[in-house]
Amino acid sequence: MIPKDHPRYQSLVTREHLAECARAGIVSLEGLTSHGRGEAFDYLLGEKTSASALRAEKTAAALLRLAKHPVLSVNGNTAALAAHEIALLQKASGALVEVNLFHRTPERVQQIEAVLRKAGAAVFSGEAERLLPLSHDRAFCRREGMYAADVVLVPLEDGDRCEVLVGMGKKVIAVDLNPLSRTAKTATLTIVDEVTRALPRIAEACTALSDDECRSLVAGLDNRGFLAEAKDEMARRLHALD
Ligand code: ATP
Ligand code: MG
């Protein structure tokens, strides 16, 4: 048993939970490696939200508020880590919640939808079609869901799908602890923060921002700037740490 006062208690509990979700089929084995990559970058951030990430989170809220058809795209890792936070953000933003998987089977989709519904989310689960110009099952999404969206929030997304969604003219908000990933570089807006910290802050800003504040945040959106600040923050901490 891990002592509760151990400095890494929470991340060890999270790891055990993800391993449990992998055994249940909710998280893929590849999803476990993604989590490890995320943990390494979070270590460099001191496992806290930077001032720059908080501004990115407010900008994400502004994009969702100004959207006509916003969609929150959920994969296995996001459902395992942040189903309640997704439900909270859905209530604050009015966005559609849709499950989109890299490693897709009908059973996994249903399992993940059940996790989200149990957490209080209203899941959009119409018939998925092969609509995105991608090979394999990543091409699947729903015509009235992600395919029709103008703004899509994709926590822990793969670079290929992010690129395709941007190419379709959508505004893509990524949550990705790695500021060097293809996703981070291609998204319209990248939040370099841990998903369970990021989503409640976006939800809070969705309710707090005025329409004018939303418009001015979106007008000033500079993703390269956010990524440069995240890298600076990590480099500064890396130099200061023993
Ligand atoms: P890309 O395909 O964009 O180049 P990748 O192949 O390195 O990235 P993927 O597995 O496709 O990585 O995407 C998962 C991303 O999610 C990783 O960059 C990882 O750092 C990030 N990540 C993992 N866990 C979390 C988390 N809890 N919060 C935020 N980001 C996370
Ligand atoms: Mg990838």
Image: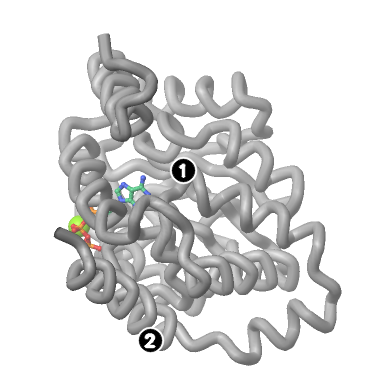
Q: Residue at x 22, y 69 (%)?
A: 240
Q: Which mark is residue 100?
A: none
- Give, as a three-letter code, the residue at label 1: Val
Q: Is residue 151 above or below residue 229?
A: above
- Give, as a three-letter code, the residue at label 2: Arg
Q: Residues within 10 Å of mark 2 (few under 14, many from 20)?
A: some
> Which quadrant of the figure shows ligand 2?
bottom left
Name the colouring of the figure.
one colour
Relative to 239, is 76 on the left or the right?
Answer: right
Quadrant of the frame with the N terminus: top left
Nearer to us in this view, 177 or 151: 177
Quadrant of the frame with the C terminus: bottom left
Q: Which residue is mark 2?
A: 224
The image shows residue 33 at horizontal and vertical percentages of 16, 41
Report if residue 228 is visible in the image: yes
Q: Is residue 59 above or below residue 110?
A: below
Lower sequence index among marks 1 and 2: 1
Tag 1's secondary structure? Answer: strand
